[in-house]
Image: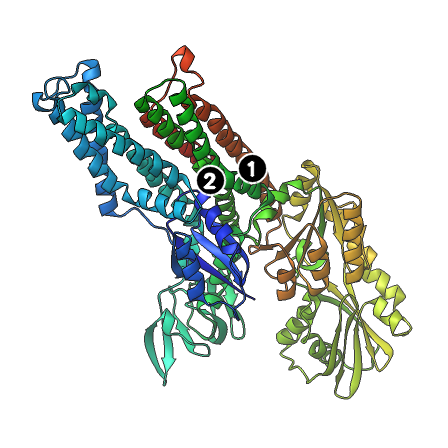
Amino acid sequence: MKKIILSIDGMTCSACSNGLEKYLNKQEGIKQASVNLVMANASIEYDEKLLTIDNLNEFVKKAGFKSLGEFKEIKIEKQGKRQKTVFILYTVLAILLMYLAMGHMIQLPTLPMIDIHQNPAGYTIVLFVFAILFLIYGWDILKNGYKNLIHLTPNMDTLVGIGVLSSFFYSIYSMVLVLQGNSDATHHLYFESVAMVLYFVKLGRYLDGMSKDKTKEAIQQLVKITPESATILKEGKEVRVTIDEVKKGDIVISKPGERISVDGTITEGKAHLDESFITGESKPVAKTVGEKVIAGSMNYDGYLQYKAEKIGKESTISEIVKLVVEASNTKAPIAKIADTVSGYFVPVVILLAILTFLVYLILGYNFADSLIVFVTILVVACPCSLGLATPLAMVVAEGLCAGKGILVKKSEILENAQKIDTVVLDKTGTLTYGTLKIAKIYNKSGLAEEELMRLVGSIESKSTHPIGKAFTDYLEEKKIPVLPVEEFKNRSGYGITGNVQGQTLLVGNSKMLQEAQIQNSFEQEEKELAKEGNSIVYVAIDGKVVALIGVNDIIRENAKEVIQNLKKNNIDTIMLTGDNQDTANKIATSIGITKVIAGVVPSQKTQTIKNLKEQKKYVMMCGDGINDSPALATADIGVSVKSGTDIAMDSSDVILTQNNLESILDLITISKKTIRIIKQNLFWAFFYNVLMIPIAMGILRPIGITINPMLASLAMVISSITVILNTLRLKR
């Protein structure tokens, strides 16, 4: 199975997106399709043996829409100058039309040649011309409505189209009567309704387009950070090329004041780089040979040469954007409810309108009055507000999260995060920075300390655990070269083994010694190191314990504050670590965590999460290492810090790019606000339709309250704008 995201043109309401989604999911070879109205794209998982991209594009076309090809970037379609000019022109025309059509009701002066009383024919012809102009303006609405009706996926445009054309053709009939000398027929002209309904719908679309653009701006800013060109070394010369011309393996040059063009590894030079857009770290980061650079980083003060490794779609920024887009294409459970309702909404409204029309005729109302009620029902019904209620809020929330360095892989996480009542935190790399340093060495090996550390550092250089980096940093500081390692094995939650210079090394914790049946001769030293808050590493050579090394970490500066705020929100916190109990207790006490589960292997971490879930707890797990991956996958919500391993990030539902624990609180807060906004939106959307459709049907006619198509179209626009404005409150 292959997954692709297609950009879609022509969707105007939830009925459009739902109809397209249903149509795609019916096609053979498509496993799953999800259509996003706000982002205007479709995420499709399909069998590439049966289907090609051309087939998918054809499916979209047959459903009544247009595929713009594979998604490349989030596009913000700013209203063009021409579009604005046309909109302003038709706004002026709409005002003139209302003056002409309704001015006589309040005795406003009009030209005799177009006055309804003095020249009914002239008045009628002018209204007809106005209607034609607005039909041209709203032709896209009529065309889209027709296409969706033909494909049995009626949408809002279908409702408007049926209503508008019914009014228009009946008005032509009345116009013929007027031109034949029947001046009373002017009272059955609805050309102004045709024009104003289309104008208000276009007004709604115009405002809706601007609001959707605002929801994408935070994500788009990331894309803009990446330079459009780069300087590469070619045959010993500096050559300026476009970013698309950079290939993997090229040596790229960065000078002070320039942004890094592509992800890569420094081969020459050193500099301070601003990576705040990814890491959230405000201070420039010192970078030198062998270290990674991220596209978009600002080079403050140094000359760098770096090898291009991740280009185009593989870059860190592209991956972030892709994650956000994919998240927006997943549907939260609350969104599925609205989608289901919207899918039945349009057919039900059409049926209600037809039945009401027939009832009015049976009750003795004339054709014109019955038709107006029919049109009013079609126009007042607003699936737009219902369709926008959830996806718009989700996209805004995902944009907010992205701006705060929180990458959410699935929309349902934003719905579920507000349910969290228990947060389980790994220690090393999560509650601490994971920047470990060698604190103390107990050496009984008979080797010089540097020689011992060379052996241990060489085998630790093969590990991705933060403790391993403490040893490699030690070797770099002492400028000690690593030795070749053979038969390297990683025992997650225990330690590592391997052969170095013909010697078998075992480097790990006390559980690893027990498993290997190696006697511990450093029990007293272990207690001393643990009391000082050190993580403890045993070193055994050829089956004998020869050294004990204490490794210390720095607690994240805001860890204590985050724990306190979680408690204020009635959320329990648990430290879950493979480290020894004494070390874990000391760190937990310093930051306010009262429950500590220490000395556990990955399977025990996973079991702990399962036990909590069995107790009806809604669990968030935060970690960064390979040993955390099973637990991250088991938790209701798994959160990985960006400094973590690839496998940990793959197993998680959320990635914190800023390595900031406060992001956990931000995620929960955004989730609560989002769900509150969605519930308000859904309430308003349902309330509006429950209220306005019966009024349009004439339920209040006995007490003299009715509405016409123009008022109906205005109400429809106000309903959508209300949902949009309420959703944008999330940004406060």
The spot of residue 635 in percent (x, y) is 71, 52
Residue type, label 2: Leu
Can the viewer see residue 33? yes
Q: Is residue 407 above or below residue 486?
A: above
Residue in front for this viewpoint, 365 or 61: 365
Can you identify the residue that label 2 sits on? 388
Pick whichever of labels 2 and 1 is earlier in the sequence: 2
The spot of residue 509 in percent (x, y) is 81, 67
Q: Which residue shows up at 52% across the image and 68% down it?
A: 50
Q: Which residue shows up at 60% across the image and 61% down it?
A: 643
Can the viewer see residue 276? no
Q: Is residue 99 above or below residue 66?
A: above
Q: Is residue 552 above or below residue 94?
A: below
Choose top left, top right, bottom left or bottom right for residue 32: bottom right
For disc 1, the neighbor class at 10 Å (few under 14, some 14 to 19, many from 20) is some
The spot of residue 535 in percent (x, y) is 76, 62
For disc 2, the neighbor class at 10 Å (few under 14, some 14 to 19, many from 20) is many
| In-image side of 155 versus 401 (left or right) | left
Residue in front for this viewpoint, 531 or 720: 720
